[in-house]
């Protein structure tokens, strides 16, 4: 047999090279396909793991957008079975979902601050009080919508009472309510919590939506002084003719001074550790200047919301919505600027008061400052 020629060797080598190239490309494609398959299987496995370990309660539920809210559980889960109430007494309102109350962050922070201060043993005497008849007299009831409102005078309470009067059905609208009816508790259709039996009181305190409003404690005292002793409405003569003389006799330093009650006299009375003997003489009229603690027992009663007078434009709509009544009634229009904290006014009123008297006053109201996040006045720090 003849040996292959050089041309045949060349052609054969070329064919081998082409075959090798083709074989390499085939392997590369197979490798690439295998890689894609591995990636695909990994993605499927990841999806399966996600679905498998997802919270079963949330599976298939519509996901809501993330907002600045927090969820706190109603303190009912740990109650003994005999203390739980039937279905017909469950709380109402859009804010309630089962045993959860959804609250914007600011309201949750207020309640958390309240709980922390209530647990502070050093402030116990300033933050705790018995849930006495005096406290229960301050709380107004709306059974129809399961609402309790604790009255804290001089923080816009008249308007909230109008809201409840309408909800209770005594009048069809806020505009229809005569001003002299609002505070006439025999005619305004607002029952006090104290008018119920002990078991009925307990039921409502446990299950109803509960709220009250606060403002800077010292500014509230100024408002009370101006309203009751300076402008003194003609239908409340006892403030000027009975209460003022009693304070003057005990607390005025200059006995020759003939002017009516001065703010300095008022501050001395309120800051006196022995003020209670006069309080007893003055009766329920003291509600305009006693502490929020004495009025509403915030460490003993678990309130749903605590509104602030300084942010009432935001807080009022929130309270109506949280109570589930925003579609039934609106809070009356708030005049511009009326809720803004007036630091200049507060400093002017206290400018003529001795540091000793101011410190004694703050010592009595320190619980209110701490419980509701109000700063200690700067003029106390100087």
Image (cartoon, rainbow, N blue to C red):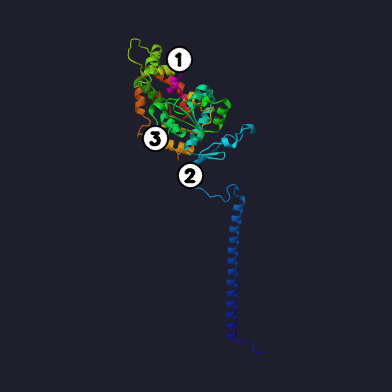
Residue 153 in the figure: left or right of residue 27: left
Q: Which residue is mark 1?
A: 281
Marker disc for residue 332 = 3
Q: Would you say residue 46 sits in the magenta stretch?
A: no
At x 42%, y 23%, the residue is 288
Q: Would you say residue 288 sits in the magenta stretch?
A: yes
Q: Earlier in the sequence, mark 3 or mark 2?
A: 2
Residue 20 in the figure: left or right of residue 352: right
Expressed as whole percent of the image width and height from the top left, the position of residue 218 reads: 41, 25
Image height of 133 relative to 163, above or below: above
Q: Earlier in the sequence, mark 1 or mark 2?
A: 2
Q: Nearer the viewer, residue 252 or 174?
A: 174
Q: Which residue is mark 2?
A: 67
Q: Earlier in the sequence, mark 3 or mark 1?
A: 1
Q: Secondary structure at mark 2?
A: loop
At x 38%, y 24%, the residue is 222
Quadrant occupied by the C terminus: top left
Residue range (magenta): 281-291
Q: Nearer the viewer, residue 317 or 338?
A: 317
The quarter of the displayed image where residue 8 is located:
bottom right
Q: Secondary structure at mark 3?
A: loop
Quadrant occupied by the N terminus: bottom right
- Is residue 96 visible to the viewer in this orientation of the structure? yes
Report the residue that reaches farthest toward the bottom. 1
């Amino acid at each position: 047999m003849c040996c292959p020629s050089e041309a045949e060797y060349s052609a054969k080598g070329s064919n081998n090279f082409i075959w090798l190239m083709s074989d390499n490309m085939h392997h590369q494609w197979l490798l690439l396909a295998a890689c894609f398959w591995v990636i695909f299987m990994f993605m499927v496995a990841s999806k399966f793991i996600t679905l498998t370990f997802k919270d079963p309660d949330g599976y298939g539920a519509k996901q809501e957008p993330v907002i600045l809210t927090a969820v706190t559980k109603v303190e009912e889960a740990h109650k003994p079975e005999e203390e739980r109430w039937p279905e017909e007494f469950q709380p109402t309102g859009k804010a309630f979902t089962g045993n959860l109350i959804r609250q914007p962050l600011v309201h949750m922070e207020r309640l958390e601050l309240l709980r922390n201060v209530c647990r502070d043993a050093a402030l116990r005497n300033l933050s705790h009080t018995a849930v006495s008849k005096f406290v229960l007299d301050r709380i107004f009831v709306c059974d129809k919508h399961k609402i309790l409102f604790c009255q804290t005078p001089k923080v816009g309470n008249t308007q909230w009472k109008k809201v409840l009067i309408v909800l209770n059905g005594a009048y069809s609208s806020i505009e229809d309510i005569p001003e002299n009816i609002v505070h006439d508790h025999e005619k305004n259709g607002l029952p006090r919590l104290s008018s119920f039996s002990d078991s009925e009181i307990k039921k409502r305190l446990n299950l109803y939506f509960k709220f009250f409003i606060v403002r800077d404690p010292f500014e509230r005292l100024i408002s009370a002084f101006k309203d009751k002793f300076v402008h003194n409405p003609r239908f409340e003569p006892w403030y000027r003719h009975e209460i003022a003389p009693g304070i003057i006799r005990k607390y005025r330093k200059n006995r020759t001074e003939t002017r009516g009650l001065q703010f300095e006299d008022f501050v001395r009375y309120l800051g006196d550790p022995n003020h209670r003997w006069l309080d007893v003489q003055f009766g329920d009229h003291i509600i305009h200047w006693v502490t929020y603690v004495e009025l509403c027992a915030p460490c003993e009663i678990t309130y749903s919301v605590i509104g602030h007078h300084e942010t009432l434009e935001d807080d009022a709509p929130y309270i109506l919505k949280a109570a589930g009544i925003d579609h039934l009634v609106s809070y009356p229009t708030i005049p511009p600027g009326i809720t803004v904290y007036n630091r200049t006014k507060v400093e002017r009123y206290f400018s003529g008061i001795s540091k000793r008297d101011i410190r004694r006053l703050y010592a009595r109201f320190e619980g209110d400052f701490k419980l509701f996040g109000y700063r200690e006045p700067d003029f106390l720090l100087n």
